[in-house]
């Protein structure tokens, strides 16, 4: 009987890519994605600490949910370069999360997850509504300890899109209702590891903003047609069939979205040309944001694709929420935003788009 | 005909207080509150800059609203002590917002308001849903340039409560649907003026979280009975008929609420003893938060009282949202919170309450 091959060949949107699945010593899954099969031998690795199960509690007044994950207090906080847990492992050196000496792109289950697939209900507190079920993955963009989406090669950004499409598929197949890839960038938004990486949260239930968006799209809201009607004054950049723009109803100063100019439910529905355009805009938008104030722009970025069981017509966008409103000045979400949900915006989106377009 | 008296005597909850109304040179209203009538002569004052009207836009996907107020970009940012705009004026010195040499407590219309009562619809952009109608007041706790709720005298905190009750009355009478007094404290939540002060936002419409709370209370949710059933393990402090506690569904680490232990729709429904208890807890809670990590705790605090036309049974609380999760470490609201509204909480409320109770 032939042994199971180390690598799986994926017929991606842009061409073949390879995935090597590895079960970490503590049971977590690690997948290495690359244009070439990965053959290296595994070294020592970091182990998941003992974690208490997380739980979900309902706020009866807001009718909202929060996740309680006290074990996250001990998570790694701005380690020195020598202790970078996202670096490739080296023989004889302290272990890292990726027990291989070389890799292109890696995805693995978070060592300090807020959501976990296997919470045992018996350990919940009397205040819990239920276990914090889900999955939290880390996506390591590169083996290099520094850089950004804008400094990665175009091929690597395309590989990132292929890997995310594969993760959407796997996490939807695992039964999760909503899968959200995202990147927090910069210490100003709380990033604790400088090594370029993103994350993926897979939720058991669709969160309320995505539920509202699915309702709006299901009721016929057509963002592609709306955008066309705006007439270009909100546009920041375009590439092939995709456009980057500041939505007229942006809540963050210089908030920028990337969107296919045709109906598209998620990155899995792009064609090869579309995936290449998205990869280029995933560099161009952060480059423009960095150029805006001449300093790296801290931001939150997320792929907003259709939930697993959304009504049709959900429109895929990639949304950047930058947090500087002026050089060195953060946009704070203080009492008004936190208590009422009403955002006060200092920079009107049409002016933001004009400035970003000119860069 | 006798001239109009300079001061109005208010029969407050705790006894008489006096209010002197002053129309500022640029038309804004200023009210000085005190235990004694205020008789001083007015000096020069700061003028409101020319402001563009703010507008409201609707996010069709979130079904939420944002306020666009671009003139706020030029607002005063961490001025030197000599330029403190909340200090009493001095003859011959640059003007301040309060053109009197002495005062106890002052409330005036914000010079850089997000919401304004008199927006002219003709100036709105094509993207507006409507004008940003409302009122933004500044509440100056004291003429001293430093200090906090915890360092004010008990009498001054009682005067603050009396002034807020008077402002609730006036702003409800002016037709605003929801009035929210609040305090942002600390540069970490974006405070641009260190002089101890709070703010009041009066909204034309009830924001969604308060609408949800009114619905929950209207449908019979009884927070007083719930709290009693929790059995004290969430309690932080008590004073007379009021209690401070960490709600089991807190979203911020060390989030603490103050509440009367009986049905009470707002501070206006407190008796004298209740107002004194509230004033003491308004000092005790921030003192405990400051003691927690041995550094001033940055927080957002708000009075959450019934909207003007809420169903009965709305329960009044004062909510503190502290933003440190450990010494020197901020709780960030990053991609997960911003994109999904799901808060991830590192400190379970029952553990937070135990630590705060012990301080």
Image (cartoon, coloured by chain):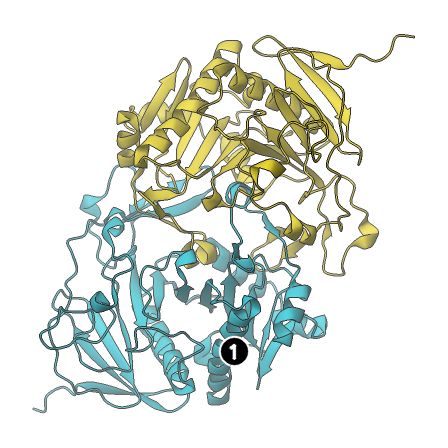
Chain colours: A yellow, B cyan
Residue A226 x/y as whole percent:
37, 27
The chain letter under disc 1 is: B
Give above or below for B43 relative to A9: below
Give above or below for B285 relative to A108: below
Give above or below for A311 relative to A38: below
Q: In front here: B318 or B325?
A: B325
Residue A344 x/y as whole percent:
35, 50
Residue B113 x/y as whole percent:
27, 57
Give above or below for B71 relative to A136: below
Q: In front here: A71 or A168?
A: A71
Taking the spot 49% from the left edge, 17% from the top edge, the residue there is: A153
- Please give the count of numbered marks on the rendered protein: 1
- The quadrant the C terminus of chain B occupies is bottom right
From the image, tell me which residue sits under label 1.
B284
Taking the spot 64% from the left edge, 58% from the top edge, the residue there is: B347
B78 left or right, relative to A187: left
Q: In front here: B247 or A15?
A: A15
Q: In front here: A356 or A225?
A: A356
The answer to whether residue B316 shows anywhere in this view is no
Residue B187 x/y as whole percent:
39, 59
Q: Quadrant of residue B81?
A: bottom left
How packed is label 1: few (under 14 Cα within 10 Å), some, or many (20 or more)?
A: many
As drawn, which residue projects farthest toward the right?
A1
Taking the spot 37% from the left edge, 39% from the top edge, the residue there is: A249
Q: State the SS at label 1.
A: helix
- The quadrant the N terminus of chain B occupies is bottom left
The answer to whether residue A113 shows anywhere in this view is yes
């Amino acid at each position: 009987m032939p042994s199971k091959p180390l690598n799986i060949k994926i017929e991606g949107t842009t061409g073949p890519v390879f995935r090597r699945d590895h079960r970490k010593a503590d049971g977590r899954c690690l997948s290495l994605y690359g244009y070439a099969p990965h053959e290296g031998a595994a070294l020592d690795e970091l182990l998941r600490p003992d974690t208490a199960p997380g739980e979900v509690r309902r706020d009866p007044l807001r009718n909202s949910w929060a996740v309680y994950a006290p074990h996250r207090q001990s998570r790694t906080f701005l380690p020195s370069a020598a202790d970078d847990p996202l670096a490739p492992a080296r023989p004889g050196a302290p272990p890292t999360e990726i027990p291989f000496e070389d890799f292109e792109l890696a995805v693995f289950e978070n060592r300090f997850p807020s959501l976990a697939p296997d919470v045992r209900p018996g350990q919940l507190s009397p205040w819990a509504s239920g276990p914090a079920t889900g999955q939290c993955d880390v996506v390591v963009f590169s083996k290099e300890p520094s850089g950004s989406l804008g400094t990665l090669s175009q091929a690597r950004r395309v590989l990132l899109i292929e890997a995310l499409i594969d993760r959407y598929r796997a996490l939807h197949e695992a039964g999760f209702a909503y899968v959200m890839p995202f990147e927090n960038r910069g210490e100003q938004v709380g990033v604790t590891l400088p090594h370029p990486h993103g994350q993926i949260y897979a939720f058991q239930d669709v969160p309320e903003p995505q539920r509202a968006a699915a309702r709006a799209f299901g009721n016929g809201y057509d963002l592609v047609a709306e955008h066309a009607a705006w007439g270009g004054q909100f546009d920041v950049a375009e590439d092939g069939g995709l456009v980057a723009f500041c939505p007229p109803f942006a809540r963050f100063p210089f908030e920028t979205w990337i969107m296919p100019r045709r109906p598209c439910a998620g990155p899995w529905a792009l064609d090869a040309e579309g995936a290449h355009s998205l990869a280029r805009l995933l560099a161009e938008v952060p480059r423009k944001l960095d150029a805006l104030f001449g300093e790296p722009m801290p931001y939150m970025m997320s792929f907003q694709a259709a939930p697993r069981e959304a009504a049709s017509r959900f429109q895929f966008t990639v949304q950047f929420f930058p947090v500087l409103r002026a050089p060195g000045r953060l946009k704070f979400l203080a009492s008004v935003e936190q208590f009422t949900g009403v955002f006060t915006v200092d920079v009107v989106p049409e002016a933001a788009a004009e400035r970003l377009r000119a860069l």
